[in-house]
Amino acid sequence: MERTELKLFTIGAYGSTADEFFARLREHDIPVLVDIRWRRGMRGAEYAWANKSRLETRCAEEDIVCWPVQRVAPPPELRAVQYAADKQGKVAKRQRSTLSAEFCHAYEQRILATVDLDDVVHEIRDLAPHLHDPVKVCFFCVEKEAEACHRSLLADALAARYGWPVTHL
């Protein structure tokens, strides 16, 4: 694989308005937003801006490539592992600050061990061929805290494999 330098970022929807969310992306001059949610929708009016079509429309207005990559998202049965840990710890999803060890292990085995990360990197680079190294890429999901979301596991795996820095917004 040819060397493609990426500078990795992560961001969540919870705790932000659309304007705040996009201001952070602009502040860091991020041209590629990778949507790594299983379901690309959110409940309630407060986060309607993060639903698939609205997010894609706003990204286009902001000149940001929005690319969905469902194959790195935890499927429902994997999310159920985390929900069980949340229930046991009496933690609401939006209040979660960390992922359970069981979920992290399951995500590593079911997703990170089976997805070809080289392919993901190639696809990201193909999205924005006019961009020069390092390409800034932001992985997006819903949780406010990166440590409470699979996006941190994915970003950390890429950082460990390729030596790229990660910034959690």
Image: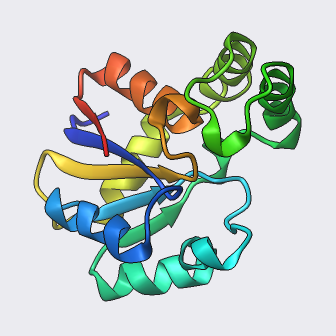
Q: Position of residue 128 (x, y in %)?
A: 27, 65
Q: How far from the left and from the top, in percent, is residue 43?
A: 74, 69
Q: Quadrant of the N terminus?
A: top left
Left or right relative to 35: residue 167: left
Q: Please state the horizontal and vertical placement of residue 145, each as a whole percent of the image.
A: 48, 38
Q: Residue furthest front?
A: 90
Residue situated in front as seen by the camera: 51 or 133: 51
Number of numbered markers: 0
User: Where 8 sits versus 142, above or below?
Assistant: above
Q: 131 or 23, which lies in front? A: 23
Tell me the colour scheme of the image: rainbow
Residue 150: image quadrant is top right
Name the residue at 25% across, 69% down: 23
Residue 11 horizontal/vertical position (percent): 41, 50
Q: Quadrant of residue 53?
A: bottom right
Determine whether, in the image, residue 61 is placed left or right of residue 145: left
Q: Is residue 157 above or below residue 96?
A: above
Residue 27 visible to the viewer: yes
Please report the residue visible at 31 percent of the width from the left and 51 percent of the height from the top: 137
Q: Is residue 73 visible?
A: no
Q: Residue at x 64, y 45 (%)?
A: 94
